[in-house]
Amino acid sequence: MTEKKDFGVHKGLICSRSKYFQATLNGSFSEASSGVIELPEDDAVIFEIVHAWLYSNKITQNKDGEDMACTNNQIVDLFVFGDTYDIPTLRNQVVDDLIKLYLENRHPFCNITRIYIKTLPGSPLRRVLLATWTDRPLRKVKVLGKNADNFQECHAFLFDLSKALVEKPGPPKSDTPQVPDPCQYHFHAEGEAKCT
């Protein structure tokens, strides 16, 4: 955790993106009258990235006045933040960005244990992780040595991976990364149209 930090956010903006903040800031909670919400369990660096995303729709962090890519851990934490505070557009964008990195052969899923500790079974983040690992399983075996700790610590991932490999039809068709339609990992509200 980082030290406490104050952020100013337009109420309408954050409420339009999050059912949690909408309910908290427009309900009968003390936060509604004060206009202040404290998030003591959350990392200020992660909220700083969320704050920038609210205004730019870009998932980046600011380092010395320049936009920089987020670390893999920050990406996981952004998804978890979006999940915790019911911000589906943030979760969906994190998934899209992870798939894009994967398709560019920059495997963003090096911290399997962190993903499994911070998400629930069936989470879209877990499902897209498994999709990338089952896409080209032979390539991933070469990575095992470097990430052995991930596999020793995360038995749930190994179970899910084994199950996904058994359920996957046939061998990979090419060595080029292939990920199914990202929309299947997105959250869509009831009645909301699927992605196009």
Image: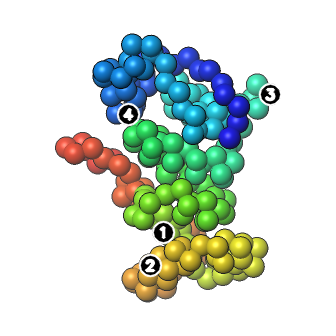
Label 2 with label 1: CB-CB less than 8 Å: yes
Mark 1 or mark 4: name the one nearer the start of the chain: 4
Q: CA distance from mark 3 to mark 4?
A: 32 Å
Up/down of 172 relative to 89, above or below: below
Q: Indicate which disc residue 64 carries.
A: 3
Mark 2 or mark 1: name the one nearer the start of the chain: 1
**Local crowd size for mark 4, using a 10 Å CA cut-off: few (<14), some (14–19), many (≥20):** some
Q: CA distance from mark 2 to mark 3?
A: 42 Å
Q: CA distance from mark 1 to mark 3?
A: 36 Å
Up/down of 185 relative to 140, above or below: above
Mark 3 or mark 4: name the one nearer the start of the chain: 4
Front position in the image: 59 or 151: 151
Whether residue 104 appears in this view of the structure is no
Residue 51 x %, y %: 56, 28
Q: Indicate which disc residue 164 carries.
A: 2
Residue shown at 22% from the left, 45% from the top? 190
Mark 4 or mark 2: name the one nearer the start of the chain: 4
What amino acid is found at the position of numbered circle 3 in the picture? Asp
Residue 153 x %, y %: 64, 73
Q: Indicate which disc residue 4 carries.
A: none
Residue shown at 57% from the left, 39% from the top? 41
**Local crowd size for mark 2, using a 10 Å CA cut-off: few (<14), some (14–19), many (≥20):** some
Residue 62 x %, y %: 71, 31
Check the image and name the residue furthest to the front: 30
**Image quarter of residue 107:** bottom right
Front position in the image: 27 or 161: 27
Residue shown at 71% from the left, 31% from the top? 3
Q: Indicate which disc residue 20 carries.
A: 4
Q: CA distance from mark 2 to mark 1?
A: 8 Å
Up/down of 54 relative to 158, above or below: above
Pointer 1 residue: 131
